């Protein structure tokens, strides 16, 4: 039985759909969610179990009988290491033989601040003795394409990434990689550096948006402090705005780009193109 945590989130839903598409029977998958009542719209025909990272007793029940668990990283900065520790301990206590974890690209070497939690989680998993796979994901293209409205309105995409390239690709690509690992064999104790086949700059993103939208959009590079001020002016929390600016500086340093080819090999096809990602994003504006 395969347990997918965070199953009501964007990535978790896609992983379950991919597992079903790969022929894993619905009764061989468990959607583990913090609030089962909010998972009714999953509508995938798989069992749902409560799994709250802050309540270890729910994790013990959720992981019972599992042969593989996908631990999708939490999204609460400052709490994630403790939450992930609960999940790792519960998996070990339940006798789960294999744990896959969604980490960040180059987790062991990157200077990006948010990588700290991932690096610590990877260390804890290694020390647990569980067989593992680290799915080190770069950025989602949806980080950029889900909110193109302001760029179209102002004619600018802003950031602090300079000319750095980011190996962003779609959530669907990362979900397909996770499903390939969970449904397949031979991935024990492997680390996959995952990203698009063709990393792009923010200027290239802006050019693609301009081309498809028929509206001039350029990339405006800002010092990190000014970018933080702009983001907080849009209503973002200062801590989150700072993390985004810090990540952009990491992009400048090449820390969210990869030429590993791991992702396309795992999914058996090329990764989504920037053009396709932008087209999908524009349809939602």
Image (spheres, helix red, strand yellow):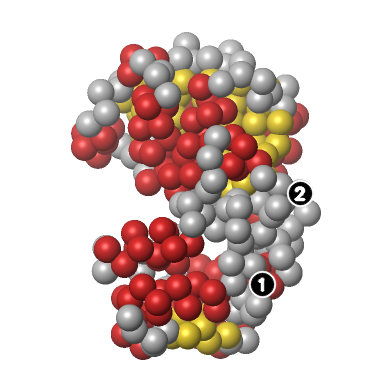
Say if residue 56 shows up in the picture.
Answer: no
Which is nearer the eye, 8 or 232? 8
Q: Quadrant of residue 51?
A: top left
Say if residue 156 shows up in the picture.
Answer: yes
Quarter of the image that includes the N terminus = top left
**Residue 63 x/y as whole percent:** 47, 20
| Badge 2 or badge 1: first in the primary sequence | 2
Label total for image? 2
Q: Which mark is residue 108?
A: 2
Disc 2 on helix, strand or loop? loop
Which is nearer the eye, 206 or 71? 206
Q: Which residue is mark 1?
A: 164
**Residue 15 x/y as whole percent:** 42, 35
Spatial CA distance of label 2 from label 1 is 20 Å
Residue lying farthest right? Answer: 109
Residue appearing at x 36%, y 15% in the figure: 25
**Left or right of 218: which side holds 167?**
right
Q: Quadrant of residue 34?
A: top left
Quarter of the image that includes the C terminus = bottom left
Are there few (<14), some (14-19), or many (20+) residues within 10 Å of tag 2?
some
**Left or right of 265: which side holds 23?**
left
Residue appearing at x 42%, y 24% in the figure: 22
Residue 4 drawn above or below residue 185: below
Mark 2 and mark 1 in contact? Answer it, CB < 8 Å.
no
**Left or right of 225: which side holds 106?**
right
Disc 1 on helix, strand or loop? loop
Residue 65 drawn above or below residue 18: above
Residue 256 drawn above or below residue 209: above
**Left or right of 106: which side holds 185?**
left
Residue appearing at x 37%, y 25% in the figure: 20
**Residue 100 x/y as whole percent:** 59, 31
Residue appearing at x 47%, y 39% in the figure: 175
């Amino acid at each position: 039985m395969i347990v997918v945590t965070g199953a009501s989130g964007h990535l978790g839903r896609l992983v379950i759909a991919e597992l079903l598409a790969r022929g894993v029977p619905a009764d061989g998958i468990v959607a583990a969610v913090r609030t089962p009542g909010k998972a009714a719209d999953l509508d995938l025909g798989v069992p749902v179990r409560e799994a709250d990272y802050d309540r270890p007793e729910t994790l013990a029940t959720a992981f019972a009988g599992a042969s593989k668990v996908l631990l999708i990283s939490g999204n609460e900065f400052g709490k994630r290491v403790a939450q992930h520790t609960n999940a790792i301990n519960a998996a070990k206590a339940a006798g789960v033989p294999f744990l896959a974890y969604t980490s960040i690209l180059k987790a062991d070497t990157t200077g990006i601040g948010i990588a700290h939690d991932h690096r610590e989680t990877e260390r804890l998993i290694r020390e647990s003795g569980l067989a593992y796979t680290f799915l080190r994901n770069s950025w989602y293209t949806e980080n950029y394409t889900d909110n193109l409205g302001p760029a179209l309105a102002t004619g600018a995409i802003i950031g602090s990434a300079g000319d750095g390239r980011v190996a962003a690709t779609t959530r669907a690509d990362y979900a397909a990689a996770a499903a390939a690992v969970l449904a397949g064999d031979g991935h024990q104790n492997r680390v996959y550096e995952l990203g698009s086949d063709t990393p792009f700059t923010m200027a290239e993103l802006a050019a693609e948006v301009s081309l498809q939208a028929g509206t001039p959009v350029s990339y405006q590079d800002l010092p990190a402090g000014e970018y933080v001020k702009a983001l907080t002016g849009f209503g973002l929390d200062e801590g989150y705005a700072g993390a985004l600016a810090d990540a952009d500086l990491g992009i400048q340093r090449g820390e969210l780009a990869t030429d590993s080819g791991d992702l396309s090999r795992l999914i058996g096809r090329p990764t989504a193109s920037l053009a396709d990602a932008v087209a999908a994003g524009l349809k939602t504006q």
